[in-house]
Each structure stands twice: as C-alpha cells, then as structure tokens.
Amino acid sequence: MKQLFCRISLAGLALTAAATAAQAQNPIIQTIYTADPAPLVYKDTLFLYTGHDEDKATWFVMKDWHAYSTTDMVNWTDRGVPLSLNTFAWADKDAWAGHCIYRNGKFYWYVPVNAKGKGMSIGVAVSDRPEGPFTDALGAPLVTGGWGYIDPAVFIDEDGQAYLYWGNPHLYYVKLNNDMLSYDKGTGIVKVPLTEEAFKLRIHNAHHTFAWAEKIDGLASHSIKSPTGNQYYWYVSAIEKNTHRKVIGVAVGDKAIGPFTDVLGKPLITEHCGEGNINPTVITDDAKQPWLTWGAEGTELWSAKLNSDMISYDATTGLQPVAADKKEAFARKIKGTVNSTEKRFTTYEEGPWLYKRQQQYYLFYPAGGVPEHLAYSTAPTATGPWTYRDTVMDVIKKGGAFTNHPGVVDYKGKTWLFYHNGALAGGGGFTRSVCVDELQFNTDGSVRRVAPTSGLTTGTGNLNPFIRHSAATIAWEEGVETTTNGNSVVVTDINKGDYIKVRNVDFKKGAGLFTATVASDTQGGAIEIHLDSLTGPLAGKCQVHNTGGPQSWKNIATRINRISGVHDVYFVFTGGSGNLFQWKEWQFAAK
C-alpha cells in the first residue's frame, strides 16, 4: 500500500500533506486498510481489533484480523495479525467484523466467516493474551444460519450474564454460558422484533406521505426501483380515512428510502385487502412483467398486473387471485424478498454494539438505507424492549464509505466512538479505514451527535521516551509499512522521504541519546529526528549501515541535541534509492 499513502484523499478530508503532518489523526491506521473497529480496555491499555480490507478490493475481500493498542489514544502500536481465516479449518472466506472480550483470564474473539458448506457462521477464537495469537476454541461454528449471520457483538452485564448480538438485516441474540463457548439452549437464538418503536421506519416522512391515510403500516410495505428507470416506488398497507378500510397506497421518489410523493392522491388498491399484514410485494415473472401481490398469511394471495408507469394496473385483468399454476412461483419470489434491501422496514441495518451507562442499555448500529449512518436505541435491560432514540453520526459525505460500523468504549474518563470511513488515498466502500472521536452524553442520557473530525487534538496522556517502544508505534505515517517478524512487528518498506510521527513525547528534563534497533542488507540510510513538524528543529541523525542482512538486528546509538519538555517527534528517513532498512524498536536516554 506504499503508493496509497502520500496524503489523505482530496476527495476525502481534503487535507494537504502539510496539514496531515501537522494535525491529522483520522484515520488512525495508515499502513493498511482497516474496518469494523472493536475496542477493548484491558488494565491500562486500550486494544483495538479490526478487519482488514485488501488493497484495490471491489468487494469485502477480507482474509485476516489485526490488533493495535494505545495508552494515550493518539499513538497506536501495531500488534500484528493474531487471527486469520487459516485459524479455522472449517472456514472458507469472509473474515468480517468481529468483537473481542476478556473473561475468566482469557480473551474471546467472536468472528463471522463463511463456513464450508454452511454459509455465514460465527466462530470463537481464544487466547491468553490480548495481542494473541488466537486459536479456534471449538473446531466448529458457535452458531450457523447462512446469510445475515454477521457482525457479532459481545457484552457482559454487571450480573455476569454475557450476551452475543449479531445480524444483517435481522437482529439476533443468545445468552452465552459462563464458558463463553456455548449458549443457553433453553432460551435459544432470539430474533429481536424490528418494530417501528424500536428502530424507526427507514422511509423518510413515512407517516406524512398520504393525506388520505388515517395511518400506514410501514412494516407491510415494499420499496423497489423501476425496472426501466431511476425512480423508486413505495407500496404500503394503509387505513383510509373515509372508509376506515385497509388499502394499498403507492408513492414515487428518487431514493429507496424516500421521501416519496403521493402522485395519485388516493389509494392504488381498495379491494380484497382483508386483515392482518397483507405484505404488499412486487415480483417480476419470467416474462419480466411486474405484479403487485398481497395477502395475509393463510389467506388468498391476490395480484394486479402493473402497467409500465408502476402506479396503475391493467384494467382488463383487474384484481384477481394468483392463478393456481403461478402460485408456487409467485410464493417463492415473494419469500425471496425477505432479506432484500427492498424489504428492510426499519433503520436497523447491521453491526450492533451493546453498551451500558448509568443502568441504561444502548444499542448502537449502522442504520439504513445505504449509505449508512449511525443510530442508537435504548432499553431498560440488555434484551429490550428497545426504543429508537436518534442519529449518532450522519452519513459521512466527504471521504465516507457506504457502510459504517460503531465501537463504543469508556477509557480514561471519556467515552469513545470508533467508526470507519474511506478517506485514505485509494479508499472507498471496500477499502475502509478506522477512525475515532469522542462520544458525549447529555444530562438526560441522550447521545450528542458526533461530527467526524480530522483527528483528536489532544491525547489522554504523554508517551514516555525512556522505555523501549516498538517502531510500529505510530500516530501518523507516510510511505512505510509494517510486518510481523518473529514475535515482533517491525517497520518495513522504508524509503527516502518517508516518515513516522509520534505525538506527545514527554522528554521531561532532557534526553541526549537515541538508540534504534535496525536491520539492513542494503546501503542503509538515516533516521532524522525532527521536533514538532517535518521541517522542525533537527535534534539528531541516526545513521544506519548494512548490518549483514534483513534479520541481522543491531542496536545503533547516537548522541542528539538535548531535548526537554513535550514534543511531537517526526522520524524522517533519508538515504539513497530503494528500501533502506527495517526498524524494530527505539528508545531515548538522558545521556
């Protein structure tokens, strides 16, 4: 990815390289594309687990998961690849959004993968250390359900009961047993009702679309795109004001989620609508003819042959029960719409994240349609009943991806919202990057809306330069990459002009010596130490020579101009052409 990180994409946050060097923090990882953040606080350290989008991907091509850590929220240490598809012998593909939690002296990482012959499933990996490595805890999936069994989120309540939520477009949960590797089969897999009260209708202004309607049933509707144009049509069950009878209305809009306009000024269907959820659904037969179908479960299935304008039907055939020879095919097509985006009635989309504050439970989630925003609902218990509250983060218009994914955690006196965008150069919907901003609450417990920023202006502490640090501890970088080398993560692909920025380094009364652990099989190069900007005061220069090979690690020390106080440090690399050296660790000393 070296060529991708000259600067944040102009189509994204529109920051120049100079601004990047001075202030950028989001996205917080620049060496690879990361997605679906899952933060975990363990002791005094915040660990961040992410998915990994492959370079130049045109789908969610993801093969492994990565881990990072911080103690100050601005400098992130790369912990490598503690988990991959290869960990699970039963996995086929799709290393998608997971969540790690600590319990009983172990770390449990719940991840969705496409299981061989089973479809999307959720597995569990376990480790004794937060940075891994992790191993398959079960040798088989914990739960299997095919499409939509993704985005697991684990939560342990104060009474010790653990819950695992997941799902797209449906929302499920299980009550985990104490071993964290099985669940209460008595309760089983619970499908959460996606009601309007819990998650809000996704159609904009749904209840104000039809002046003639006493009320509409947004959970009995279908939003489809015209087969011949760019307009969308919303068919919905309603109660007419004048007759108090159930009818079907149709409205037209430019987007799948509206807002829609009632162009007829009256219902489209006024007969044979019966009782219950009549599930108006448009299907297309083998001749590509669209039909509007409806009928409550266990009752007659009715149909109308739609005209090309999609807001009227063939008066010759009129309204009629679906013919016996078409009933099976129609029923199959209607059932096939259940998981489609056209039949997603509420804003809940995927990626649930359960969080608790002052005895109130918050469910954060990406909300639809697409592109996604972030929203939240609250409940008095970990299992509901849920009440929709509001948007947390609007659709990210500049530098966004068409998905988003929340991760919420308390750390060092503040609450943090992790999410992802597409702002790195080359980024987009399938090449995403993790960001973080502060999440704040009002006195009544409601969540203040978060506007994505270019990064945190202040951290939660300073970095101590007088202890050994991984060279893969980075606030911002341009040009370099990282890789696992034995038990360490090292900085590689170092070329002339590349640099690494480390923020808030507290030299206290002074440092006069710098030591770096490096390896090189080339002519080497140098590490220039600049303070507070790329062109700031030069504190010193550490010359790196050929050490005898890429695995021949040597400590190289150099005296520097005395530094005191708190500074951002820029390690700027100089030398000839090509890769200069690899870098494992660094440390300052008083003298």
Image: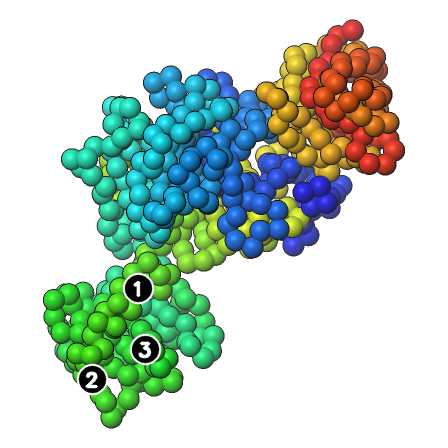
Q: Pointer 3: residues within 10 angstroms few (<14), some, or many (20+)?
A: few
Nearer the observer, 200 or 165: 165
Q: Which mark is residue 89?
A: none
For this view, does 565 lie left or right of residue 268?
Answer: right
Q: At which x and y percent is residue 388?
A: 31, 48
Cα distance in 3D space between marks 1 and 3: 13 Å
Cα distance in 3D space between marks 1 and 2: 23 Å
Could you tell me which quadrant the N terminus lies in? top right
Q: Are marks 1 and 3 in contact (CB under 8 Å)?
A: no
Classify residue 165 by image quadrant: top left
> Closer to the camera: disc 2 or disc 3?
3
Instruction: Check disc 2 and report its element: helix, strand or loop.
Output: strand
> Closer to the camera: disc 1 or disc 2?
1
Amino acid residing under circle 1: Gly
Work out whether 219 lies above or below 95.
below
For this view, does 91 lie left or right of residue 21?
Answer: left
User: Which sits earlier in the primary sequence, circle 1 or circle 3?
Assistant: 3
Q: Residue under circle 2? A: 319
Q: Which mark is residue 336?
A: 1
For this view, does 32 lie left or right of residue 516?
Answer: left
Q: Pointer 1: residues within 10 angstroms few (<14), some, or many (20+)?
A: few
Amino acid residing under circle 3: Asp
Residue, x 31% and y 43% (percent of image)? 144
Q: At which x and y percent is residue 387?
A: 28, 46
Amino acid residing under circle 2: Leu
Instruction: Check disc 3 and report its element: helix, strand or loop.
Output: loop
Residue, x 25% and y 53% (percent of image)? 195
Residue, x 31% and y 83% (percent of image)? 306
Q: Residue under circle 3? A: 285
